[in-house]
C-alpha cells in the first residue's frame, strides 16, 4: 500500500525536482532553496498519506456487487426488460429467469448484476431501499 502510494507520487516529485534544477540553472535560484522545495514536497506527501491511505487499500467493497439484494421500484413494466429506480439512480433491468411479471411501481429485488444490467425479481411487501446487511 505504501509502495503504491509512493509510486504514484514519484512522477510529480520528479517534475518538481526537474523544475527546481532548471530554476537553479537558468535563473540562479540557490541550490538550498531547490533542496528545501523538494524536501517540503516529500513532507507534504508523507503528511497526506494517512488522509488518502484508504484509497490505496485493496478491497472488495463498491461496484455493482453491492447492489445484490437491494430493493428498488420498477419504472416500466419489465416485459422482460425496462428500467428500475434503485436508490437515487435509474438502472436498466431485466426480469430474472423464472421470475413473475413486474409492473410499473412494483418493488423489485436485485438477484444478479451483469455488466450494467440488473436481473431482478418481484419483492412483495418490501419497501425500496438499500439491501439488508447481516452481521
Image (cartoon, grey):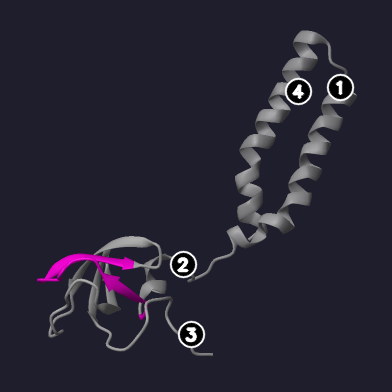
Please state which of the two labelled residues, at mark 3 or mark 1, is closer to the viewer: 3
Assign a secondary structure to mark 1.
helix
Q: Earlier in the sequence, mark 4 or mark 2?
A: 4
Contact, CB < 8 Å: mark 3 with mark 1?
no
Earlier sequence position, callout 2 versus callout 3: 2
Percent x, y of residue 115: 27, 63
**Residue in the image at 35% along x and 86% along y:** 126
Q: Which residue is mark 2?
A: 62
Residue 120 image point, x, y percent: 24, 77
Residue 79 shown in magenta:
yes
Query: For the residue carrying disc 2, how many other residues have a C-alpha within 10 Å: few (<14), some (14-19), or many (20+)?
Result: few
Specify the quadrant that holds the C terminus: bottom right
The secondary element bearing badge 3 is classed as: loop
16, above or below 65, in the image: above
Relative to 65, is 94 on the left or the right? left
Residue 41 falls left or right of residue 7: right
Q: Position of residue 128 (x, y in %)?
A: 37, 77
Report, in whole angstroms, how far the alpha carbon at label 4 lies from the one at label 2.
40 Å
Amino acid at each position: 500500500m505504501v509502495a503504491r502510494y509512493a509510486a504514484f507520487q514519484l512522477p510529480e516529485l520528479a517534475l518538481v525536482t526537474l523544475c527546481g534544477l532548471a530554476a537553479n540553472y537558468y535563473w540562479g535560484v540557490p541550490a538550498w532553496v531547490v533542496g528545501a522545495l523538494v524536501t517540503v514536497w516529500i513532507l507534504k506527501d508523507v503528511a497526506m498519506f494517512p488522509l488518502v491511505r484508504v484509497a490505496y487499500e485493496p478491497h472488495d467493497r463498491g461496484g455493482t456487487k453491492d447492489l445484490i439484494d437491494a430493493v428498488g421500484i420498477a419504472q416500466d413494466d419489465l416485459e422482460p426488460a425496462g428500467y428500475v429506480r434503485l436508490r437515487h439512480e435509474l438502472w436498466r433491468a431485466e426480469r430474472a429467469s423464472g421470475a413473475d411479471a413486474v409492473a410499473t411501481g412494483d418493488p423489485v429485488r436485485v438477484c444478479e448484476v451483469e455488466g450494467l444490467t440488473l436481473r431482478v425479481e418481484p419483492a412483495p411487501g418490501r419497501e425500496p431501499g438499500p439491501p439488508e446487511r447481516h452481521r
